Amino acid sequence: MAEDDAAAAAGSPILDLPEPLLLHILGFLTDARSRHRAALACRRLLAAERATRAALSLRGDPRSPAFLFLRPAFCFPALERLDLSLASPWGHPFLSSAAPSADAVAPSVTPQQVAEQNELVAARLAYCFPAVSSLAVYCRDPTTLVSLTPHWRSRLRSVKLVRWHQRPPGLDAGADLEPLLGDCPALRALDLSEFYCWTEDIGPALAAHPAAAAALTELDLGLAGATDGFHATELGAIAGSCPNLRKLVAPCVFNPRYVDFVSDDALYAIATSCPKLATLRLREPFEPAATGQREDAAVTVAGLVSFFAALPALEDFTLDLRHNVLETAPAMEALARRCPRIKFLTLGGFQGLCRASWLHLDGVAVCGSLESLCIKACSDLTDASLAAIGRGCGRLVKFAIHGCDLVTSAGVRKLATALRPTIKQVSILQCRRLHTAACLAALSPIRDRVESLEISCVWEEVEQPESVANGTTGCDHEDDDLGGEEISYESASKKCRYMELDDLVSWEMLRSLTLWFPAGEVLSPLISAGLDSCPNLEEISIKVEGDCRTCARPGPFFGLSDLAGFPVLSKMKLDLSEAVGYALTAPAGQMDLSLWERFYLQGIDSLMTLYELDYWPPQDKEVNQRSLTLPAVGLLQGCVGLRKLFVHGTTHEHFLTFFLKVPNLRDMQLREDYYPAPESDMMNTEMRAESWLRFEMQLNNRLIED
């Protein structure tokens, strides 16, 4: 080894550099694999890599002998951000009495032995990562934090808790947060966006530790899986306990039919209690009733004007409601005057945002400092409104419209033309008059500018207004009436190419593509609809929603093989979690979930450049068990280029042998990250912690060429 190091040093002039300069150069390597390759060159680079590493996500088993008995040289003195929430097996605490044994075949151990092992693991983590100030960890119960926090209590400034399993019974209100608020005086940021607990747990915990609550500057109360939100009294108590907050995220009850709902008074109480707020994101977590129209919220324009006047430092504001707020143009004009730093704005259920009745700008169009604007469920947003927003908000980098039924391709094209110098991210979802081909044609002025695109894939013909039929989209009106057949899309695409030079420009800057599909729809027409040339597309995300039980039997495959035309596609997220079907048996003429998985995954083996895959299997909501079926396992096995595979669900133990045949697979996890995650972890046929540890040992013992 010494001779090899000497030879490497002799052939590498970079190793002759002084130590501070070498550490500075290595700090520019942000890609994890690039840093690992550099560290393997010689011992000096290995030491330099560990000395400059700032963040690490640990996916291995911290209880394994390979970790507990590492050499003293395995230390990262400068590492500040440590993520333990993905430690294997995912979802099982490694620092509590319920932790599985590191040796999958070892006999059961006593609680005293488990406690000693947990203390050993915690001490080992503190030794290897002494400078941790930001921590993410999966906590099924408070004992995990009780073991970890004493080792970093004086340094921890930011903590993220993760839990998708049900809240343990018998806990007192606020018991989950007691180890943090009571033993970490330096804590400034608390993230509970992926932590399932009750809304009643937050207020008592903060009230019991007033000094710790007053020191918080960031508080994310997204609460994973929450079907309810904070009431006005609870929200006011939280804001009163944390007067120095600069960031607050929370689900809230805005429905006026509920007791103690959030109204103008509650919003103003937040503003007066936390005057330093720069980021405020409030949303309504539950959907409106399936029948009837959307009701009006108890939030008024006058209340919003007073609210904005009390928050002059506001930069990022989200108010996503399932109820309507009427005639909000004056409130948006007050936002522009009272909050000059506002850059990010998301509004849901706001009506009358921009009337565009005259030549002068009004409503949200006067917010000229905006860099990101997302408008949801605005029933009176028109093409003229989009044109006014394009003229007034000239700094927009990201623009999104969701569920705006009056918007057509003519308005999208005007907006795209006006924002061409700045726009980089576009999201257009579930707008009734915008089918996919017309939407992509309307975005042709910025094809060479867009880096991130999110659209709904709707192939059936929709009714277009006269303004679109008159040729404002750049194609003849015959081309806008595209039918559901693939040949129609291909013909329309060819006509557009010959008619406009703009359409010859490819999506050369597009790096990320997000697609939304209704259940039963196919991917195949996408390419001929306008996404035929994406030479630099690296990441694609596909979301399928709907009840498959009401769909007719689809064609032979979904169409993933069509994505093989993207030469550098390396990462895919395939989310079928909202595709509901029959879990076990289906009536005559209906497909069960195994056949639906075969439909969606068929052809994935043709994506030779695919490096990482996140997959959410479909499920039957009544069963609440998301699991890989045999056809899915067989098809995923065919992805020979996969290096990382994350399945957001579970599977049978004997199915795992299929994945051992993927030649380059190095990192795989099963994540039950949906609420409520199944508590029956010891079922005979489903994956258990011990089963996963055995598989992980086999996976790590394989020889991989690179």
Image (cartoon, grey):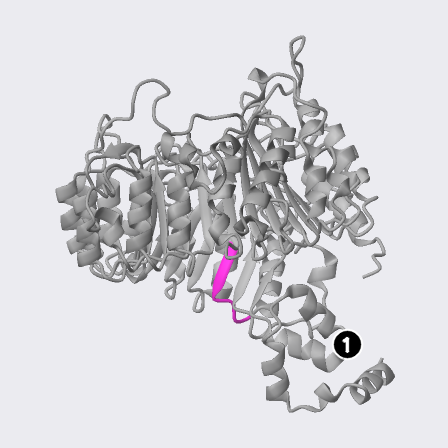
Residue at (15, 48) in percent of width and height: 305
Residue sitting nearer the eye, 181 or 269? 269
Q: Three-letter amino acid code at disc 1?
A: Ala
Q: Which quadrant does the C terminus fall into?
A: bottom right
Place of residue 499 in the rendered image (x, y in percent of width and height, measured from the top left): 55, 44
Let me know if residue 26 appears in the view: yes
Let me know if residue 674 appears in the view: no
Q: Residue furthest top?
A: 588
Residue at (63, 35) in percent of width and height: 490
Residue 131 highlighted magenta (yes or no): yes
**Is 470 positioned to the left or the right of 236 in the image?**
right
Q: Which residue is mark 1?
A: 41
Place of residue 614 in the rendered image (x, y in percent of width and height, measured from the top left): 63, 44
Q: Which quadrant does the N terminus fall into?
A: bottom right
Place of residue 131 in the rendered image (x, y in percent of width and height, measured from the top left): 52, 71
User: Which residues are drawn in magenta?
Assistant: 130-136
**Is 474 positioned to the left or the right of 128 in the image?**
left
Q: Is residue 24 above or below residue 610?
A: below
